[in-house]
Amino acid sequence: MKNSPIYLLILLFFLTACPGEDPALNDDTPDAGPTDDVIDDDVEEDVEDDEDVYEEPVDHPLATCDDLDPTACAFPWPSNLYLAPDQSRATGYRLQFDDESLPKNIPGRHVAPELFEHLDGYDLGVPIMVRFPNLDDSQLPDEYAIEESMDDDASILLFQVGGGQLERVPYWAELDRLEENPQQRTLFIRPAIILEPGSRYVVALRDLQDLDGNQIEPSQAFTRLVEGDTDGDDVLAHRQERFDDVFALLDDAGHPADSLTLAWDFVTASSEAIHGPVLSIREDAFDYVDENGISWQIEEVIEFTDDQEAAAEDEDLEYDANFGLELRATIEVPHYLEPYGLIEDAWRLHRDDQGQVQRNGTRQADILVRIPRRALEGDTVGIITYGHGLLGSRWEIYASHLGLMAQEFGFVMVAVDMIGMSHQEGHVAEQAAADVNHFSAMADRLHQGILEYMLAAHTAAKDLPNLEPITSRDIDIDGDDLHYFGGSQGGIFGATFMALSPDVERGYLAVPGNNYSTLLHRSVNFDDFNLLMGLTYSTSANLNINIALLSLMWSHSDPVSYLRHIAAEPFDGDPRQVLLAQAKGDWQVATITNEVVARSGFDIPLMENYDETRQPYAADVATYPHQGSATINFDFGNPWPEPGNLPPSDNLGDPHGWLATVFDHGVQIDHFLRHGEIIDICDGEPCRMPAP
């Protein structure tokens, strides 16, 4: 995207002036968004006991907005107001918003509630948001003081409900630094662990002050609920029993309701609702390819020689002395999408009348294969399936450091586009910034993109060694020596891939993160996206709610939903291993999200000697050599970012791509991929590296 504000304003005009009505906003037309999935009975569930998931037996939505926080509709987020009882769902709820509960853009189109009714709770990385005008946040724990969130006198209390009791959950708090007006700043309460699926949580706030030193008073609606004085107000009267239960839980934990400024509860979505669509697609697709195979169509075979840059007349071809052969091909794969209809070349999931995702024929997926020169000289080589960066493409395997990796350590590089988050979706992302309803097309198509990554790895291991261009040159490819290597976006969604792939046991995730509701504000890559959405939706509160809504739509593929299923709770019973390598002070991907993972008990600890100046609170730590998964922090001299929801910036520059300059890290990666062991390349010290 371009950086000019004038460009953004011009783009905003054209996007919001586009004619036509969104079917998702018209009751007389079919729903353009997702509907309920019919999930196989054997999908694993993570749901608390029924007694811990409160049932409110009334019709929904009760009201358009939640009066607990009168400063913005849908605050506090995530509100229990929008949990509609539904005993057909694993949690006993479905998300149901009123037609005008969610933000509207300049042309007046609200985000459609139908986009979320397939979910039975909120996402596992949900940002908790509320607004108190002129709030003084100086006494609240930021991302570097998470331990203070567990103090007895903390002003914010976050709990998980289990067995009728409350258990403290760590968090950090931050005021929205994108909003200049202190009267309008959103307070974010970000859980410092990844939440459990199908679980109930309680939020309580107390002893808050404004910047003038005055005590912040409860809202009128909350005061009436505390006093039980809700007669005459149909909405509050319906909610009284639920809040009485919340108050009883808090009182038992030593926090009486009359001492609170605000409190409420919410429920997270079940594994069935979050993972069901992807798991059902995976099962059907692999059944299909087991029966029918994956057919390759070789479009071009390019052989590189020493005395010429390329044995092909192709202006786009880049010569790399590390490679000897390149295959450009397509593979025929099962297809689960249909045209979205509202944007050209955009897609949504193909569903039957009951809302179950169905196969919709097959499609040709482009696949690119680069074979190192050593393979043509008789060496046996393994396979790396590569994951590209933000809105990128398979062509990124032309990068010089990947050529060096392939030749030095003996790997064939295989790549496909992750459709849904590839270069093909740039126009959809721009449309979605102006109308969040359109983001459903990206979120839906990403299901197919993740599937095609899995199928690319599967066919590379099974079929690539037997293709004619390989056998005719006596190239020996070991299909069992199969791994994943992804960077940036490929490192992010690489975690999702590793939790789902039936073929790949070990993966390397470079400069990764998770939870887009946290990542979006903290990345320079999304400055223009956030600016455009802020312009179209008018207020910072709307922008923040929209980012939470994007994360709800993303929850089926965001690694925040899958990291627990790599090693700790694998879907198929066989744990996988991942090596995460982050760059301290990364401007594009927030490293704090990896620390959240290490604190969540998923068997993905931080490696020892994490940093010279700080050790993240309550994070699991592993010692070298380590057999299993872990995160390594590489320090190129950048400082830790200033706390808050802004991208980092410093005089040294963005270290996001600098891992590629560390040769010894390549040795570390190769050893991990082939032996599952993480070795120390930093001599028992924090991994300090010179900036390139």
Image (cartoon, rainbow, N blue to C red):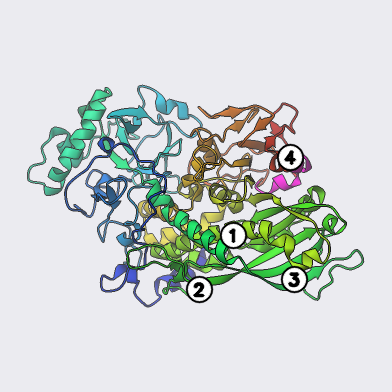
The quadrant in which the C terminus is found is top right
Dominant secondary structure of the residues highlighted in magenta in the image: helix
Q: Position of residue 633 (x, y in %)?
A: 64, 36
The quadrant in which the N terminus is found is bottom right
Q: Which residues are magenta?
A: 656-668
**Pointer 3: what residue?**
316
Q: Quadrant of residue 126?
A: top left
Q: Position of residue 187 (x, y in %)?
A: 37, 41
- Name which of mark 2 and mark 3 comes first in the sequence: 3
Q: Residue at x 78, y 68 (%)?
A: 469
Q: Position of residue 178 (x, y in %)?
A: 45, 48
Q: Amino acid at mark 3?
A: Asp
- Name which of mark 2 and mark 1 comes first in the sequence: 2
Q: Determine the CA span between mark 2 and mark 3.
A: 24 Å
Q: Residues within 10 Å of mark 3 (few under 14, many from 20)?
A: few
- The residue lying toward the viewer, choosing from 199 and 576, is 576
